[in-house]
Each structure stands twice: as structure tokens, then as C-alpha cells.
Image (cartoon, rainbow, N blue to C red):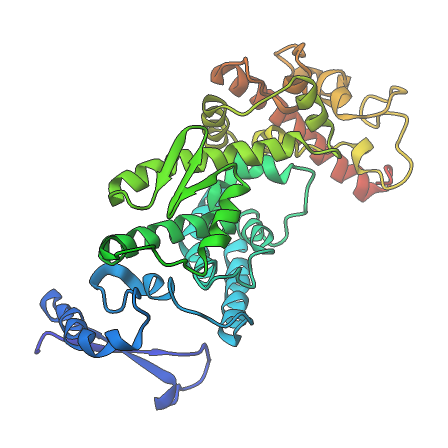
């Protein structure tokens, strides 16, 4: 016991002295002493078991707190603690958004600090938590920065190529739920004789998986394109099948972008009968890691021009080359003489490649070279547009 150390952590942020009752003592000791809570849990297991429902995973070793909630009836109203947790998530997102680091670093910090706190009360209580609808906006604010404008980028393409499944709280909750359900099954469910209990949150998870194209086959078992996801497997086999689960999420999100009726790039993709493939997804994610911010913005449809920024009347003359033509995206990227020195690659015949810098039949190297050129032009055009706006020569 001589090697123990007690640390007092304030429960609330403050600038003055912290009262005694406002601190939380944390005991830090050798690993052997940390076994005591597990041993004590086994001792009280016999006393607690009658207080739970017949198949409830009470004090079941590594089942975890999520497993304890799987078979419990919980209140359907939002609890005050859940609202407080959501406010903490929003405040943390604002702080992450102000960090003077790269977008990829802020995104990694958000994955570690925001996602675990936001996902805790999702689905496991048999309902969606209060932050389910606003999570994508909260996550994007943390990754892009609090002062970053909304932009014209497709949110769905951003999810597929930049943020990943962590930015989808419903999908993240499904993954966490399936792991808890697998633990529950191996500790208690497989010993049940007769029909297995209908867990309160199972229907909600099945509905969320159905959004991705999965359909329920049996208790704790779903299928998608001939691939099965079975919570009665060993944990290693279940985690391996999560690859197919993530691919189904990417395919569903990609299809949502293609189906958009408000975007020109989506219209071009529909005309090409574009479909998601695992190879295309790897190329987009790899390019996002290798390229700069301007190139990544072009890749997801995030480039603006004087024509797209005009609130009412679109300009009929390009402010950069002074030619009587609408300064649309195609003109700025491929025809405007003001950026002629930045073009080493001619305009692709594929309309999607000319607009987003990638196409399903292009190699990763070809996409990278094209996106680098388009990113340079985007950066220069944005700088010129800000200068014109500040001087009053161009009304946007």
C-alpha cells in the first residue's frame, strides 16, 4: 500500500480554490491492487443476480456496462445527464475546432475525444440519444474548425473520402452495440434454453442496419449481399466481418450522393451510372490523406467561383480574364487565361473528372496529378476573389 497515490481531480472547471466536496479522489496503485474490484464483483454477484431479469448480464466479468443495459427496460424520456453530455460534446468540439493544427489532426482528436462520449447513450438504451441528429454537424465543426464556412462540398462525399464512419453516429452505435451483444451471447445467451429474449434495442439496430441494406436473418444475425454478420461468432470473426459492414455504409453513403437532385456533380454521376466499389473507395481515401486542402476540397465538390457565390444575379463577365463569359467552375478550371500558367494537364473528356478530379476508370496516380493542378487553381482563385471582394470591385 506504500506505493499507492491518491490524486484529487476537480469535478467542475473553475479559477478559484476548489471546495473539498467538489473534488473526485482517484487512487492509482500497482496492477495487483486493481484486481480487487473484479474479485469483489464476483463476491456480490450472487446477491445482485436475483435483482436482474432472468437473462440479464449482471456482474459478468468483461461484459461491461453496455451489456448490463441490453436487457433492461429504461425510460424513454431524455435524461438530464444525457443533455449535459451533449452540451459537453458540443463544447469540446468548439475547443478542438480552434486548435492550430491540420484538419487530419483535428479529425483524429475528434475520433478519440468526441466519438466515445457522443455514442454512449445511442441505441443501448433502446432509443436514439439527443445528439443523434446533430452529430455530423458537431463532428464537422471540430474537424474543419469553428470559423470555417459551410462550403459547397458534398457532405456525403466528405463522409466517404474524408471523415469516415466515425462521423455517422448511428453506424458507430451499431458497431458498439453488436460488440456488446456478442459478449452478452457468449456469457449468457448461449446457455438459454428455449427462445432467446427480445432485447428492447434489437429492433432499433435492425432498422439502422436496414438503412444500409442489411436484413435480419435470425436472432443477432443479419445478411447483406450474401455476407453474414453473426453476433454468435467469436469476437475475432465478428470484428473481421465489420469490414463488410463498413463497406455497406460507404456504398450507401455514396449512393446518397449520386441520388442527390440538387448537385451538378451528382447529375453527372447518375448519367455515367456510377456505382461505388471497394477499389474506388480506397483511391478516394488514399488521395485525401496525400493531398492538400484545396485538392481535397475539389475532390468532394467544394470549389466555388464568382458564378456560384453570386446571391442573385450571376456575373456575365469573368472578373479574372475580362471575357464575356459566365465565370463558372468549368471556365475557371480549364479555360480562364488568368490561370493558364497553372495548367499542365489538358481538360479530361470525362465530365466527372473535369469537375471533381477523379473518375472510376482513372488510376490513383492520374487522379493525384489532376487534383494537384485543380487544387492550385482553386487556391489562387479563392485568393483573387477575396481580394476583389475587399476592394469592392466584385459584388458577391
Question: Does residue 342 appear left or right of residue 94 in this picture?
Answer: right
Q: How many marks?
A: 0
Residue 95 appears in view: yes
Where the C terminus falls, by quadrant?
Answer: top right
Q: Is residue 335 above or below residue 215?
A: above
Image quadrant where residue 300 sits = top right
Q: Residue pushed farthest front?
A: 194
Q: Residue at x 75, y 40 (%)?
A: 386
> Residue 82 versus residue 62: which sits nearer the camera?
62
Horizontally, residue 19 falls left or right of residue 291, namely left
Residue 67 drawn at (x, y percent): 33, 61
Is residue 167 in view from this perspective? Answer: no
State the residue at coordinates (44%, 45%): 105
Q: Quadrant of the N terminus?
A: bottom left
Residue at the spot x=31%, y=36% of the render?
240
Residue 54 in percent (x, y) is at: 30, 68
Q: Tell me: 270 left or right of 100.
A: right
Amino acid at each position: 500500500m506504500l506505493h499507492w497515490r491518491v490524486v484529487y481531480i476537480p469535478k467542475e472547471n473553475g479559477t478559484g480554490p476548489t471546495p473539498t466536496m467538489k473534488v473526485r479522489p482517484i487512487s492509482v496503485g500497482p496492477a495487483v491492487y486493481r484486481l480487487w474490484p473484479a474479485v469483489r464483483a464476483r463476491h456480490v454477484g450472487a446477491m445482485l443476480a436475483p435483482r436482474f431479469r432472468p437473462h440479464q448480464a449482471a456482474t459478468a466479468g468483461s461484459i461491461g456496462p453496455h451489456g448490463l443495459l441490453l436487457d433492461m427496460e429504461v425510460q424513454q424520456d431524455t435524461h438530464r445527464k444525457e443533455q449535459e453530455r451533449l452540451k459537453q460534446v458540443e463544447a469540446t468540439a468548439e475547443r478542438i475546432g480552434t486548435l492550430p493544427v491540420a484538419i487530419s489532426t483535428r479529425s483524429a482528436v475528434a475520433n478519440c475525444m468526441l466519438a466515445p462520449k457522443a455514442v454512449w447513450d445511442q441505441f443501448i438504451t433502446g432509443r436514439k440519444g439527443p445528439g443523434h441528429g446533430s452529430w455530423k454537424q458537431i463532428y464537422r465543426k471540430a474537424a474543419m474548425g469553428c470559423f470555417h464556412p459551410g462550403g459547397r462540398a458534398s457532405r456525403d462525399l466528405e463522409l466517404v473520402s474524408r471523415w469516415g464512419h466515425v462521423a455517422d453516429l448511428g453506424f458507430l452505435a451499431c458497431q458498439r452495440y453488436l460488440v456488446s451483444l456478442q459478449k452478452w451471447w457468449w456469457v449468457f445467451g448461449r446457455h438459454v434454453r428455449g427462445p432467446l429474449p427480445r432485447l428492447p434495442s434489437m429492433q432499433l439496430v435492425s432498422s439502422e442496419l436496414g438503412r444500409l441494406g442489411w436484413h435480419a436473418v435470425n436472432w443477432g444475425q443479419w445478411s447483406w449481399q450474401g455476407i453474414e454478420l453473426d453476433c454468435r461468432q467469436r469476437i475475432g470473426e465478428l470484428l473481421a466481418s465489420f469490414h463488410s459492414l463498413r463497406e455497406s455504409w460507404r456504398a450507401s453513403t455514396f449512393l446518397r450522393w449520386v441520388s442527390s437532385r440538387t448537385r451538378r456533380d451528382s447529375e453527372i454521376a447518375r448519367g455515367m451510372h456510377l456505382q461505388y466499389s471497394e477499389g474506388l473507395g480506397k483511391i478516394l481515401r488514399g488521395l485525401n490523406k496525400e493531398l492538400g486542402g484545396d485538392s481535397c476540397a475539389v475532390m468532394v465538390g467544394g470549389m466555388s467561383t464568382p458564378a456560384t457565390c453570386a446571391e442573385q444575379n450571376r456575373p456575365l463577365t469573368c472578373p479574372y480574364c475580362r471575357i464575356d463569359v459566365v465565370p463558372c467552375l468549368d471556365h475557371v478550371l480549364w479555360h480562364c487565361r488568368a490561370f493558364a500558367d497553372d495548367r499542365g494537364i489538358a481538360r479530361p473528356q470525362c465530365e466527372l473528372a473535369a469537375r471533381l478530379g477523379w473518375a472510376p476508370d482513372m488510376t490513383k496516380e492520374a487522379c493525384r496529378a489532376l487534383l494537384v493542378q485543380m487544387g492550385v487553381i482553386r487556391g489562387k482563385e479563392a485568393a483573387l476573389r477575396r481580394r476583389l471582394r475587399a476592394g469592392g470591385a466584385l459584388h458577391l
